[in-house]
Image (spheres, rainbow, N blue to C red):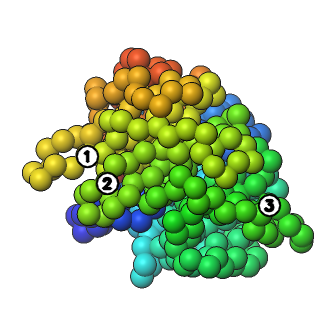
Amino acid sequence: MLYRISSLVALLLCCVQCAGAGPPNSASPATLPNATFSPSGPFLYVGGGELSQYALGDSNPRHSVDLSLGANALALDSRGNLFVANGGVSEGYIAVYDAQSLELRRSEELTDDTFLAVSRRGYLYASNCGGGIDVFTPGGMKYDYTRYLRTGTVCALAFDRDDDLFVVDGNSIAVFTPAQPPGNIKLARRIKSGINGPRALALAPSGQLFVLNCPRCAYHRGHPYVSVYEPGSSSPARIVSGDISHPAALAVDSKGTLYVASAQLDSKGRDPGWVTVYAPEATKPLRKIVAGIGRPIALALDPSDNLYVANGEKGSVTVYAAGGTKLLQTITKGINVVLTLAIR
């Protein structure tokens, strides 16, 4: 048990400090495009050393499952399937759980996947910052095909309201549209303007694309920023910056308020980080959230625009009122090294 926990902590610290496209599930979508699954939800799902499910507003888990390899990423489909990516480069799998009961439905061996996304048709797309995207048929783990990209560094994934897939692909964002047969995708365009060291992305309900950039983050240098794109555009409408350091995740609420998690690490590891809040259409910070924060690694939003922050250092999830104006709740029960969040 001690070995497993220490391995998960090592994974967490690596994700916060190293280069690449950011930590597990750094896109942290508040909702997914195919949003029907309900019975009595929405629920909060917290993944790490355990997989736990919570009713919104409750600090005690409804269900918890021990994960021997830890959860790197979570995704849900409209049919009530919860997909969990577990493990690392030498051992791992994607498991499918019943999203209501957390009963295991099936699993598929697949190592090192860190990013998951589900299309409106229910196809599951998985990547690990390798050279391609693994695609699985709806509702389960039947492997369909692998879509290889040219750069060899396919990382964060997210679908928009039109079911177009946005992918952090090297030093650009590749945009794919649905193709035939169902589940296939074709490259429509590539966004390069305003992109420099992309680590995570998020799509607003309005269709705007937000890309978290961190030039030379691996060297603890550079000036992180968020580039924002109007639907269909390949050039940024604005650049958002200020009060971002070693960024780990971003999220955008229904009104266009932007949140960026900074997992700041000083030379002695003392700075717990913060979450910066930007008003809709703003380019400079509105406020910083510091209460309850401890190395924030993932963000999520509920239907009321309440903000959920996964704190890697504290092993907790803190919940804030819309706009980050007030700490509402701190969740610690059912959490064993938190890495990723999802809400549906």
Q: Secondary structure at mark 2?
A: loop
Pick the front one: 55 or 176: 176
Contact, CB < 8 Å: mark 3 with mark 2? no
Question: As shown in the figure, which amino acid type bears the numbered disc 3?
Answer: Thr
Pick the front one: 26 or 1: 26
Q: Callout 3: few (<14), some (14-19), or many (20+) C-alpha neighbours within 10 Å? A: some
- Assign the N terminus to one quadrant of the image: bottom left
Of marks 1 and 3, which one's residue comes earlier in the chain? 3
Asked which quadrant contains residue 149, the reply is bottom right
Q: Is residue 199 above or below residue 162?
A: below
* Label number found at residue 177: 3
Q: Callout 2: few (<14), some (14-19), or many (20+) C-alpha neighbours within 10 Å? A: some
Residue 90: percent from the left, percent from the top? Answer: 42, 82
**In the displayed image of the protein, which residue is found farthest to the right?**
180
Of marks 2 and 1, which one's residue comes earlier in the chain? 2
Asked which quadrant contains residue 237, the reply is top right
Question: As shown in the figure, which amino acid type bears the numbered disc 1?
Answer: Gln
**In the displayed image of the protein, which residue is found farthest to the bottom?**
90
Q: CA distance from mark 2 to mark 1?
A: 14 Å
Q: Label 1: which residue?
A: 264
Is residue 108 found left or right of 296 in the rendered image?
A: right
Q: Callout 1: few (<14), some (14-19), or many (20+) C-alpha neighbours within 10 Å? A: many
Q: Label 2: which residue?
A: 222
Is residue 74 found left or right of 284 in the rendered image?
A: right
Is residue 76 found left or right of 211 in the rendered image?
A: right
Which of pointers 2 and 1 indicates the residue nearer the eye? Answer: 2
Pick the front one: 40 or 77: 77
